Amino acid sequence: MKFFVDTANIEEIQELEATGLLDGVTTNPSLIAKTGNDFKETIASICKIVSGPVSAEVTATDSENMIIEGKRLGEIATNVCIKVPLTLDGLKACKSLSSEGFQVNVTLCFSPSQALLAAKAGATFISPFVGRLDDISIDGMGLIDEIMTIYSNYPDTLKTEVLVASVRHPLHVVEAAKLGADVITVPPKVLKMLVSHPLTDKGLASFLEDWEKTGQKIL
Ligand code: G3P
């Protein structure tokens, strides 16, 4: 499973890139607004740090302008992945942009039927929002399961990768991996939570305490 980080914060991306765990980055207008920085400059900086896909979202709502904006974003760097919302106009823009060879991430997916249409429109990635479904007492991971089943029924024609988004905690990551999701985009905080285990911390403290008693040094 590929790991993307869901942030537009350059320092956080730099820190995580150094771990070697990052396969890409996702941003959205809310994450860009949170940084207070210029959108296109931010995307350009992220694309220099990470070689994998960097999702940058259009803000037009009609297909014609989504395509114009998408192409403008695509000029920033070769690894820009144009993000469009799951509306009829978004699907039209997806079809057009993907036919021209751009990577497209169709976002704000909340149903299996939406995911099926995005794949038919040639999306590179479909982004189902699991956390926002859980927030309204609908099983977010159940949606991933349904999409994986649908896509796997048509392996020769539906090539879209399932990118699990709106991730809130480590269990979402584990469940996504169990279901065979292609990609997960994780807030930096959750990525760090994945590493931690109290027994690891306790075990390490006790190893170091015992090592100290030997008076030895490796170097
Ligand atoms: O980037 C899209 C998605 O991951 C947003 O997550 O936490 O705002 O629902 P969230």
Image (cartoon, rainbow, N blue to C red):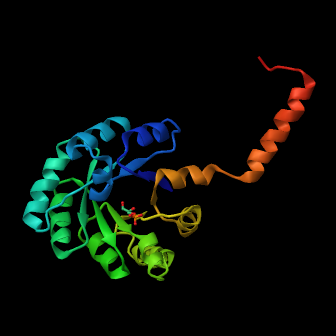
Question: Image point 32% across, 47% down: which residue?
Answer: 35
Looking at the picture, does residue 110 appear above or below residue 53? below
Q: Is residue 18 left or right of residue 195?
A: left
Q: Is residue 128 left or right of residue 172?
A: left
State the image coordinates of residue 34 (x, y, percent, origin top left).
32, 52
Looking at the rendered image, the quarter that the C terminus falls into is top right
Instruction: Name the residue nearer the viewer: 99 or 88.
Output: 88
Looking at the picture, does residue 83 appear above or below residue 128? above
Looking at this view, name the residue that lies furthest to the top.
Answer: 219
Q: Is residue 194 left or right of residue 215?
A: left
State the image coordinates of residue 112 (x, y, percent, origin top left).
37, 80
Looking at this view, name the residue that lies furthest to the left.
Answer: 64
Q: Specify the quarter for ligand 1.
A: bottom left
Looking at this view, name the residue that lies furthest to the right.
Answer: 214
Quarter residue 100 falls in? bottom left
State the image coordinates of residue 15 (x, y, percent, origin top left).
48, 37
Can residue 157 be seen in the rendering of this structure? no
Question: Image point 46% across, 39% down: which residue?
Answer: 17
Instruction: Name the residue nearer the viewer: 193 or 3.
Output: 193
* Marker count (numbered): 0
Can residue 86 be seen in the rendering of this structure? yes
Question: Image point 37% across, 44% down: which residue?
Answer: 9
Looking at the picture, does residue 79 appear above or below residue 110? above
Quarter residue 163 falls in? bottom left
State the image coordinates of residue 104 (x, y, percent, origin top left).
26, 58
Q: Is residue 210 left or right of residue 191?
A: right
